Image (spheres, grey):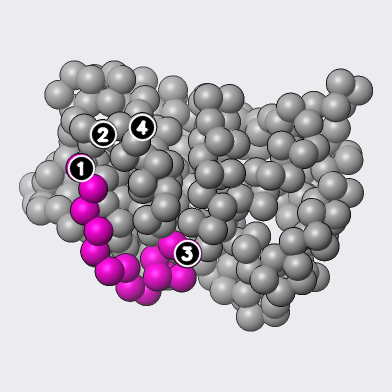
Amino acid sequence: MQEIQQPAGSASRWGPLFGAHAEDWAETWEGPQGWGTPVYEYVLDRTRIGPGTRVLDCGCGAGRFARMAADAGAAVAGIDASEALIDIAVDRTPQADLRVGDLEALPWPDDAFDVVTGFSAFQFADGKVQALAEAGRVSCGMVVVVIPTRVPEAGIAAVFKPLFPLFPPDALETMKRSGMFALSDPGALDEALAASGLSVHEDEDIDCPVGFSDADSAARAFIGAGPMQLAIDHAGKQAVAETLQDALVPFTGADDKITLPATYRVVLAGPQDPKR
């Protein structure tokens, strides 16, 4: 089932950007060999998602985790800013309750879910505290927040760095506030969780390298990422593609496969006031 509401705020900005190359995103980052398997499996295990578990995935994208949770027997819902990605998620898991909307205003009642997840999602919200508070509101159990750790010399951060000159200056400022690493600085996520009424129950770093079969597939994946559309609009797709090819060289093996080291922080949180 798909329900569409008119996104506002950060969703109205990110939705069209992540939807611009939705098929590329879905087939690379969220394909069978895409990003996230170690993190997804860790979360499925630690939260004991199984038959009958009510799960909401915030920022569900093309629905890879939603499909995995459904395969485990869960009753799955998801929300994302991009209508194009939700369309793909619906095709993958038709029985799920998948909606287009804002993380800052979730369209579900209090305590509707046992587990609420956000895989590299909450940091893109303009109102991060509000988005986390909404996740806590609709969860009667666990809220899972997954964010990348920031290592400037390694992995995805190193690939993005030479691309910065191709972005308009105002876009770079926006991404610092609401972008991939917006909650990755020391203390940033902890402060946001505390302000939202959530407390940390478990906190673990999970190695989750990103791999691609060759430079072309890697470039396709990065061009499919929402923020990259800002650089494409500003400097042109060819300039972005050429810069990406150069940036990926240090991570290319003798077999032409590309491996980007990455570590993700996985936080399992719950309400500060369990009697709410």
Q: Is residue 207 magenta?
A: no
| Residue 11 part of the magenta-drawn span | yes
- What amino acid type should be assigned to the residue bearing mark 1? Met
Under mark 2, the amino acid is Pro
At 71% from the left and 31% from the top, the residue drawn is 212
Is there a contact, CB below 8 Å, between mark 2 and mark 1?
A: yes
Q: Which label belongs to residue 1?
A: 1
In this figure, which residue is indicated by the disc labeled 3? Answer: 16
Q: Are marks 3 and 2 in contact (CB under 8 Å)?
A: no
Whole-percent x and y of residue 54? 18, 33
Local crowd at mark 1 within 10 Å, few (<14), some, or many (≥20)?
A: few
Q: Residue tagged by mark 4?
A: 92
Q: Residues within 10 Å of mark 2 (few under 14, many from 20)?
A: some
Up the image or down, 235 lies above or below 240; here it is below
Range of residues picked out in magenta: 1-16
Q: CA distance from mark 4 to mark 3?
A: 21 Å
- Up the image or down, 271 lies above or below 230; here it is above
